[in-house]
Image: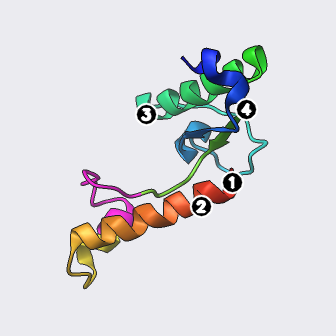
Amino acid sequence: MLLDNGPGLEQILVASSDKAYGAHKDLPYSESVALQGDHPYDVSKLCTDMIARTYANTYGLPVAITRCANMYGGGDLNWNRIVPGTMRSSSIASRQLSDLMVNQNVIMFMCKIL
């Protein structure tokens, strides 16, 4: 379906993760650092990036890839991560309100990229 509509598309946004970079000793890393992964989640993000770039190169699709860090959304119950842990321990009363605020910020950021 994307290939059929490709010529009319302005931009395809692929929301990946900084986990596509894997673990690096030298921080902060830049976008020029090679993608790598030691864990299944890392590799899944790396594969997503590679597939998106392959479609862009092969079919000329207008692809933009974001690799955001510490994203939070409903269902993220890993309290050891900084954002969910902070949200859990903060005085923010409504989880639904906080999810909405975080999601709106992410959407605004991604729209600026496009």
Most common SS among magenta residues: loop
Say if the magenta span includes residue 75: yes
Q: Position of residue 60 (x, y in %)?
A: 77, 21
Q: Which residue is mark 3?
A: 41
Chain part drawn in magenta? 72-85
Q: Position of residue 3 (x, y in %)?
A: 63, 16
* Residue type for callout 3: Tyr
User: Which residue ends up furthest to the front in the rendered image?
Assistant: 8
Where does label 2 land, which residue?
A: 109
x, y percent for residue 37: 55, 31
For label 1, the crowd category at 10 Å Cα-Cα, with few meaning under 14, some 14 to 19 and many 20 or more, is few
Mark sitting earlier along the chain (1/3): 3
How far apart are the alpha carbons under marks 3 and 4?
25 Å
| Horizontal side of residue 55 vs 75, given as left or right | right
Q: Amino acid at mark 2?
A: Phe
Q: Which residue is mark 1?
A: 113
Towards the viewer: 1 or 113:
1
